[in-house]
Structures are given as C-alpha cells and as structure tokens.
Image (cartoon, helix red, strand yellow):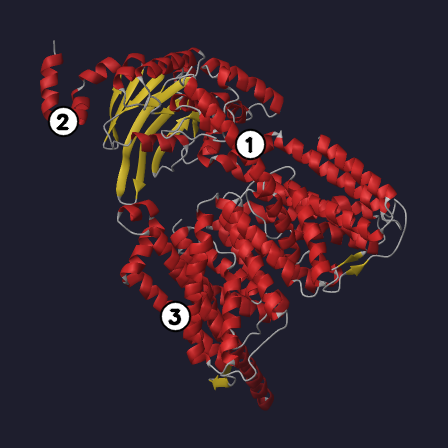
Amino acid sequence: MAVRCRGERADLADAGVEALTTFAQLLVGGLLTGLVFALVAVGLTLVYGVMDVVNFAHGEFLMLAMYATLGLALLGLGPLLGLPLAVIAMFLFGIIVYRVFVRRLLAGPPEATVFGTFGLLVLMQGLAQAVFSSDFLSVPNPPFAGTIRFAGLAVSQASVVEGCGALILTALLFAFVEYTETGRAMRAVAEDRIAATLMGIDVQRINGLAFGIGAACVGAAGALLMLSYPVYPTAGVPFALTAFVVVALGGFGSISGALVAALLVGMLEVFGGFYLSPELKLVPVYLAYLVVVLVRPQGLLGRR
Amino acid sequence: MTAAAVPLLEVRGLVKRFGALRALDGVDLDVAAGTLTGLIGPNGAGKTTAFACIAGAERPSAGSIRFRDAEIGGMAAARVTRAGIGRTYQIVQTFADMTVLEATTTGALLHHPRLNDAVARAEEVLEFVGLADKRHRLGRALTIADKKRLEVARALATEPALLLLDEVMAGLTPAECGAAVELLRRILARGITILMVEHVMEVLMPIADHIVVIAAGKTIFRGSAAEAVRDAGVIEAYLGAPFADDAGAELGR
Amino acid sequence: MIALGAIVAAGLVTALGVRDAVALDLVFTLLLYAVLGQSWNWISGYAGNISFGHAIFFGCGAYASALMVTHGLSPWLAIPAGAVAAAALAIVTGFPTLALRGHYFSIATIAVAAIVDALVRTQPWLGRATGFELPIASGWAALQFADKGPYIVLALVLFAAVQIATIALERSRLGYYLRALRANHAAAAAVGIDERSWKLLAFAWSAVIASCAGVLYAQYTLFVDPPSTIALGVSIDIALIGVVGGIGTLWGPAVGALVYVVLAKGVALELGGTGKGYDLVIYGAIICVIAALRPHGIVGTIVDGLRRRRGALELGAAAATGGAA
C-alpha cells in the first residue's frame, strides 16, 4: 500500500513537472517569437507615429528583405554580413519609396495612404511572383540549425538568434529615438508637425528618415526570419497581420508599447497554437485586438 | 421652483483640467429660456473651453451641466446636438463640396428623416437666414460672412432649443455685423435661446439680456450688460486694478 | 438611370442571343464583380472606411448556399441566411472600430477575415479546406440552370437592384450623413450625426449585398471552398475593383469590374496565365498611380473635375456680384 501511494505521488509529481516544463517551454517560445514580432512592429509604429501612416505594405518589405538575404546567403554571404547589408539596402529602399511615392500620398485625402500602401502591397507581391515564382525557397544549409537544451527545455538555435537579434535591434532603435537629436526631432514631428516646422525641423527629411528606419527594422527582421522560415511572395502577410495587431494593441506610435504588446501577442500565439490547434493559433490574437480596440482604443501605452 | 423658473441651461462648478493646467476652475452660469446671454472675458479666460464642454467637444473634469433639467456633462458632441443644442464653430467648419441647400438639409435630416421633408425645411431655414438665393452655391465658394451664416442655418435646421454661437462676429465688417445682429433678433423672436461667446463688445452689449464674465477659469460676474461695465471686478479683469479704481470714480456719478 | 436601362437591355440581349459559353461566363463574372465592387463601395467609398476583408461576406452567401443545399433545403433560403450571417459579422467588426480613425477599422476587417478563414478551414461542418460541391439540379426552385442565360438574367437583376439601391443611398438620410462625415467631422457632429450607428448601417447593407452575390456565385459554379470565396486574395480583388473604378461614385465599381475583367482576360491571353504575378503587377501599379495622383479613381476624377469647374464659376460669380447679398 505504501509503495503504491509513493508510486501515485511520484506520478503526480511527474505530471506536475511535465506541465511546468510544457508551460516554461511555451513561455520561452512565446517570448522569443514575441521579440521578433516586436522588431517587425517597431518599424511600423515608428512610421505611424511620425507621419500618421499605416504602411499596409509592411509585410511586403519584410518579404523583400527575406528574398534579399536569401540571395546573399546563396552567394555565400552568411548572416553576419547579410544582415547589415540587408538593413542598409532596406533603409535606402525605404527612403526612395517615401520620396517617390508616400510623400505624394500624404498630400491627398486620408484614404489615399490606406489604398496607396495597399497598391504597393499588390505591386510588390506581383513582382515577387513574377520574378521569383510562387515556390517556397530556403537556404540549403541553414546556419544555427541545432537545438539548445537547458533545464529540461529545448529551443532551436535559430529562434534564440532571432530573439536576441530582435531584442538588440529594438533596444538600439529605442535608444536612437530617445537619445539622439534626430530621434528627438522625430518625436517632435510625431507630436506636432506644425510646431516642429516652426522649430526649423525639415519634416520631409524626418519623414523620409523615419520611413527608411522603419524599412530597415523590418529588413533586419526579414534577414533573421529567413533563417527558419521559407521565403515566398506572400511570406510577409502573416507577420504583417500580426504586426498591425501588435501596433494597435501597444498603441499606435509607441515603441515601448509595441514591445510589450509583441511579447503578449507572441505568448498568445504560442499558447493558442498549443492549447487550441496550430491553424487556430492566431484567433486569440485577433480576438484580443477587437477587445482592446473596444475597451481601450489608444492601446496599452498609446497617447492618441 | 416652478417649471418656468428652471433655467434652460445650468452650469455649476465646471472644472476642466488639461494635465496640470486648470483651464476652468469652477464656472457657474445660467441661461434662461428665450434670452440672449453673452459669455465674455479676457483672452485665455476659458470661454472657449467652457463652450467646448457644454457643446460636448471636451469632457469636463468635474462639475455639472444641466440642459432642460437633465445632465448632459460628458456627452459626446453629436448627442448634445440631438438633445437640442445647436452650435457654430469659431473657425468655420464648412462642408466644402456640398451646396448651401445640401448642407442645410443635412442639418434638417435630424428631425425630418425623409429627404423631401428635410429639403423643404432647409429651404425655410435658408429663407429665414437670407441665403435662399445662394442655395445652389458650393460651400467652398462662399464668402466668410456667408459661411458663418450657413453655419447658423445648418444649426437652426436641427431645430435647437439653445443655440451656441462661438465668436460669430469675428472677421465681419460693420455692415455684416449689423446684418448678423438683425438675424440674431429674428432667431430670438422664434423662441430660440442664444448663448454667445463674443469679443466685439459694441455689438454684444446692446443686444444681450444677460452677461456672464469669466476670468482665469472662474465666473466673476453675472448680471445685466449695464451692470457689467460698471463692475469693478470686471474692469480689473480686463484692464487691470488701476483702471478699476479710476473707473469706479468715473462711473460713480 | 438611362445608362442603367441601356446596360440592362444590352445584358438581356446578350443573355438571350449569345451562345458562346466563354463570352457568357465573362459577362456573368463582370456583373458579379460589379455587384461586389459596389458592395465594397458602400463602406469603403461612401462611408470612407476601407475594408480589406470583404470576401468573407461574399463567402457568407456562398457557404449559406452550399450548406442549405447539402442539408436538403432550398438554396433560396441561403439569401436571408447568408444576409443574417454577413450582417452579424459586419456588426462584430464595425462596432468597436467605426467610431475610431480609419486604420483601426481596416485592420479589424483583416483580423475578422483571418478568424473566419481559420474557423472555416478547421470546422468539419463548414467543409474545412476542401469545401463543398453542390449537387446538380435544375429549375428555378433549385436555383440552378443548365444554360448560362438565366444566370445572367439573375445577375443583371441583382446588378440593377444594387445600382438602384445605390442611387437611393445617395438620396437618402444615410447617404447625406455619410457624405457629411467624410467632408467634415466637426461639422457632422454639430448636426447630430452619430458616426458609429450610421456607418454600421452602411456596413451591414454592404455585407448583405456581397452575400447575395455569393449565393448566386455558389449556384453558378457549384463549388465552394475557402480559396475561391473567403481568402485574402478575393478580398484584395474586390478592393482592387473598387479603387480602380473610383471610390464613392455610382459607376466606379462597374468601370472597375470592366477594367479588371478585361485585364485579367488580356493577361491570360498574352502571358499564358502562368503565375498570377503579372496581373497583380499591373493592378498594383494602377492603384499606386491612382493613389498618388488621382485618389478618386477614374470616375471620381471626372466628377471632381466637374465640381471644381463649377466651384470656380461660382467663385467668379460671387466676386462679380460683390460677395454677401
């Protein structure tokens, strides 16, 4: 009898440890996923904060970066070189897109930015399909392919690299916006465009820079994500959708809000995928969006 | 207190804070039905903020706003309009691509849901304010005086019991002012109560039944126009203490 | 109205006279897209809140049809059933978001569309990823015909009804209020317009119209599955038609549908239809150009031009007569 009791208690203990392990596993997975969402979302929220534009083509910028870094990787340039190159290229791309296109959208009626960036989405997806075809592509020998094990948990090396990379870059962006003069100028434009003009700030230049930085952020995210996700013309769509929700949850224009919201969304997605089903993993995320918008439209940390 | 004696609009202890700034620090005012009340005060006194709170454009931080004996403080602007308060804006808000008739009809639709009825009512209102001959002109093609007149027409079309006018005389020539005053008289004759914020004193004082003076976010005077110009507190608020003493001596004949 | 009459007449002639199946298919598609585009136009054009998930309302009707038929009920019941489902979805999407700034709503449409897509793909009773094949039947009771002619007549009826409804919209309280909300928010509040209620009404109607188109589509193709009815791609196509033709105009969607069908056919003929990329490139480029230079689309630009000339004339008249009367 005593033996059986001990056996039962041991079973319960095992079950408890297993549940805890699963929970911890999901938690870590959620955090790492969330960090990457943060990097994707942070560019979007910066652009919104500075010029009141939701770039509906944000996912396509991500997709472009993924293709670019994939190409660099196939040429033999590993991620260490590929990432900075992608970031610089996307930064320039963002500035060009702003100068040539987005600037004109801003001059029109408010719907113009919505369906203008939508048109960009369609154009970029079409170009990707035309040039690269709809095939799913990926790096033949992906770096960071191993698994790290600690404390009974298992995480892929790639996701750790992605998470850490995202965290570093988000922190860099935050520091830039908070502590540099250009960053301060951006915050000024975000708060009051007319007053900023009166202070001598060149709003067009700041807008272009913000758009470029936004593109650079999502470019970095694309370079990181390419490590573990396949690349195809509509690859950016799920990430973009999540980014929109993250930005709204965190508060349009708030970088810290985007980080907090991204971690929450990462958790929601990972837990949802486990407890509901992989196909339904985004449902709690979207439901959360509707609830937050209903209850607190300015998001968790937003101002407007 | 009989029903007739309850003021149409009663504001008590209205407070509005913007962060640490107390734009309104306890404003009281009453508007009796059928009268024209002027809301005046030096620049930055809080007149526009008080107006905005009453009209629903801003949410009061504290205090009560009662209209027709019901609390309306904190109600959204559209709902305040539906409750029976019409308003005009300090900076004219025109429907640029609508004709004068269309804009007024939009107002009339509030109480006349069928388009034909609304158009008929709008025509009446345009006749009343004197814009009937310009009914097919686009909003963007009007002079500033006509834009203001249209804004009044649009507000009247919603059949308000109380009309809030925000610096309606600003930017008008003396001739246009005279026409505006004449219109205000006709509005009053129809039984509509008016509360107006105004800076152009020589126009307001002769026609106001009642004056409320706000300074530094507080009501400092309530009474007739004649009493207002003699009140030491009012003079001090506008011109400073030295003048109050002098004026007191002057006016104390 | 004259234009509408002419189109209906032309359509009837086509339906009864033409025998070429491909041409008839084209006409049917054109009419269906015009209806879908107009439904999108009600919320995205007239109300000004751009919807990126409109396909789900189309799907409501299509799936309602499929469900009715596979459960032995009349497909005609799908019209009210789909309409109710569509209106409900519209209210869920719009209630939290229509009183806020535009992008909240647009994102919500994407979110709700994604939820619906995920649910349909996982629920067995909704057919999952494989969808439904409708059993072949014939006659008006079953809403199915061997010949394409009656389908086109029905599509014409639907198109005409929707155009007439849109004309009625422009001349209704809802139409005036939507116009006011787009023109000047502060002024709209000053005339007592409650933005959320009125936009919800427009959105619900918009959803119902799309659902009706869905019912007809299901009865025509006899096949309903997620990629053909509720996928993001379908929503994008609907939005494309609306934007290209002209947001907020009566004939914009019809023009947009025409451009879409012609381009799609043209691209398929020239480039062999491999990889949908090329037509997307063209559409995307057109939308970008329109957004940057002529945000009101083809029809809208014409209307704008007329308005501006009139405004200039009137300004001139006002100046000549010396201003205030």
Residue A277 seen in render: no
Mark carried by residue B240: 2
Please tell me which residue is depicted at 33% across the width and 19% down the height of the picture: B37
Query: What residue does disc 3 label?
Result: A169
For label 3, the crowd category at 10 Å Cα-Cα, with few meaning under 14, some 14 to 19 and many 20 or more, is some
| Residue toward you, C245 or B177 | C245
**Relative to residue B206, is residue C43 depicted above or below?**
below
| Residue toward you, A145 or C258 | C258
**Relative to residue A129, is residue B182 depicted above or below?**
above
Task: Have a look at marks 3 and 1 and say if they share a chain.
Answer: no
Residue extending farthest to the top is B253
Q: Give the structural element (helix, strand or loop) at label 3.
A: helix
Please tell me which residue is depicted at 90% across the width and 50% down the height of the picture: C138
Query: What residue does disc 1 label?
Result: C306
Residue extending farthest to the front is C270
Which quarter of the picture shows residue C196?
top right
The answer for how far apart the CA atoms under marks 2 and 1 are is 56 Å
Instruction: Determine contact: label 2, label 1, CB under 8 Å.
Output: no
**Relative to residue B205, is residue C296 depicted above or below?**
below
